[in-house]
Amino acid sequence: MSKTLPQLLRREQVAFLVRDRRAWGDHLNRVSSFLGEGLQAAEPAHPVLILGAGSGLEVPWDLAPPLTTGWDADPWSRVWTLLRHRRWAPWVFEDLTGGLADLEAAARRAAVEPWSQRRRPMAVASRRLAALLPYLLPEPAALQGWISSHRPGTILVANVMGQFGVVAERIVETTLGGRPWLEDPEQVDPLAEALERWTRRALTRFLGVLRESGAELWLVHDRAVVWGGGSVEVGPWEDDWTRQLHASGAELEVSDALAGVDVPTVLTGGSLELTRKKRWIWPLTHGQRHLVEALALRRRG
């Protein structure tokens, strides 16, 4: 696992927890209710796995069956869950993508000359890393191994998939020693584009493991990030999430949190069918709102 990942996740979790959550009440209730429904629907005789369990803020552990395991790479996540829910659950501290250690190693090779150990100029390091990224193939072997060993009947994915790209960016920035991204949005940024393709591969392979797990799935994740101060509302469900957003007032900028991956398309078919689907706005902070997607998929028959 990446040496940087636990520290980055802990920093992100602390920043998340210290924000003013007074405007989040509706969002937290929606997430907790949805995940709680998944926990109550789980068969108690079969293991349950909660991916991205975090500090337990969004997960109603009081509804979790006895054979429930949490998964979060931040070693403090289990302690926070204990303090919040009085539940010392079994836990896995691993990278869900299976690719962040390789990403960090590639960024380090790009950043430092091996013969002199001097740091390369940022522009040079960025070009080298952009050239290396297409050869990195994230493989969630730890997750696949756990599923093969424990055969969970239900898997919850608690607001973690939208963080794959964010954490990858932070690892690149930390390893390269600054922000390598081009500031001009009109310019083509080879590194940003290569990292987005890496994120797409990581998400697709992660979802593939879930699809092949045989478990029923309950997923909550950021579908998009909406920037700007204008009002925005979510209309009736559309398969194309961009058609569901209705904005008025100031111009808004919308970014795709999942690097172009459509979760229902990847997961449905075969033995899984989509039984629940919701989207809503989460007002994270001033000028930044997230479009959240919640999906439930069950085995046919």
Image (cartoon, grey):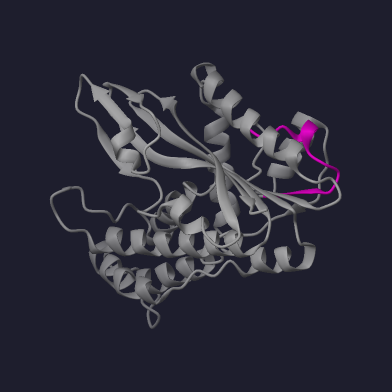
Instruction: Please identify the quadrant where the N terminus is shown.
Output: bottom right
User: Left of 244 or right of it: where is 281?
Assistant: right
Q: Position of residue 146 (x, y in %)?
A: 72, 64
Q: Which residues are magenta?
A: 58-71
The residue closer to the viewer here, 288 or 146, is 146
The residue closer to the viewer here, 108 or 78, is 78
Tell me the residue at 54%/64% (across/down).
Answer: 208
Residue 56 seen in render? no
User: Left of 101 or right of it: where is 47?
Assistant: right
Q: Position of residue 129 (x, y in %)?
A: 33, 70
The residue closer to the viewer here, 136 or 252, is 252
Residue 122, above or below 247: below
Q: Residue furthest left?
A: 186
Q: Position of residue 179 (x, y in %)?
A: 32, 52
Tell me the residue at 50%/71% (across/down).
Answer: 102
Q: Residue furthest front?
A: 301
Q: Position of residue 169 (x, y in %)?
A: 40, 54
Q: Is residue 66 magenta?
A: yes
